[in-house]
Image (cartoon, rainbow, N blue to C red):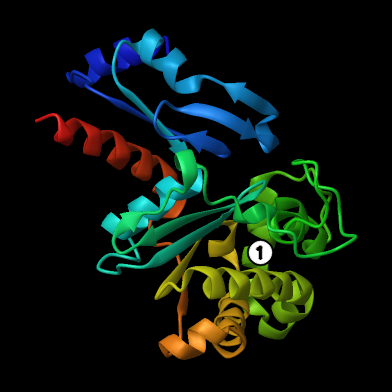
Amino acid sequence: MESAGPLAADLGVRPVACGISVPGVVRRADGHVHEAPNLRWSDVALGTRLTRALDMPVVVGNDAELGALAENLRGRATGASDVVFVSADIGVGGGVIAQSASLRGGAGYLGEIGHMAVHPGGRPCYCGSTGCWETEVGEAAFCRALGLPETSSRGRVVAALRALRADDEGARRRLGDLAEWLTLGLVNVVNLFGPELVVLGDLFTELPTPVLDDVDRAVRARSLVSRALGGVRVRTSALGTDVKLLGAAEAAFEDVLDTV
């Protein structure tokens, strides 16, 4: 926050709003973070605090919801009216665009699909439950599949995934279990929300093409709703690592335009 003023001065601009992306359960009305398990946050009045500190309107949103917004406005899902964005970071989050608008649920609490229970008796999750989807397809799961320590850096994980690009069958063999869990979760997501497109972000964008193609085909075949819709497409993000920051900026910009 201390850098905001000097940075604006260097750029010769006057900030009028701020957008913040948080990997957790966020109330969009006031930016209250009910819980962000992977950050160990609980009941943090982030929006109120930052609005006061920065002396400007601050929009705080769930990171995957903001990712969905960015993809729908500027990325792979441009022109699609019903989209689910699924991102894999330390955890797994989801954002839903329904009839060209963000679906937010009661008080804005929607999209925690990473905490969908998929594996009874599975691994414990930060959220306090067990067998959550993100325990099978989140960053730690990627590390296990690649034979890396679960504390490995993101760069090391990405490098290991890229090394598999030259070996299609090796990639399928090494990542087969993770791909099956990814497929299982996506089948549930597609059956629940009925999107025309699923966009995968963050670590999922580094999956080798043959593995992604296998997941795409499996979701089309195994999802009842996908078959009814004629085949829901599963694609990777076109916006890279900045997708959630772009979404946060878009959310802040929307509120500014509403006051013009």
> In this rendering, is residue 122 above or below 155?
below
Residue type at tag 1? Leu
The answer to whether 250 is drawn above or below residue 11 in the figure is below
Quadrant of the rendering where the N terminus is positioned: top left
Image coordinates for residue 70, horizontal then vertical, percent: 34, 51
Q: Nearer the viewer, residue 7 or 235?
A: 235
- The reply to whether residue 62 is visible in this rendering is no
* Residue lying at 75% horizontally and 56% vertically, measured from the top left: 132
Q: Is residue 102 above or below residue 78?
A: above
Q: Is residue 99 shown above or below 73?
A: below
Please provide percent x and percent y for residue 141: 76, 58
**Is 211 placed left or right of 244 in the picture?**
right
Residue 248 is left or right of residue 138, and the answer is left
Which image quadrant is residue 181 in? bottom right
Q: Residue furthest left?
A: 260
Residue at 43% x, 22% y: name it.
47
Q: Which residue is mark 1?
A: 161
SS for tag 1?
helix
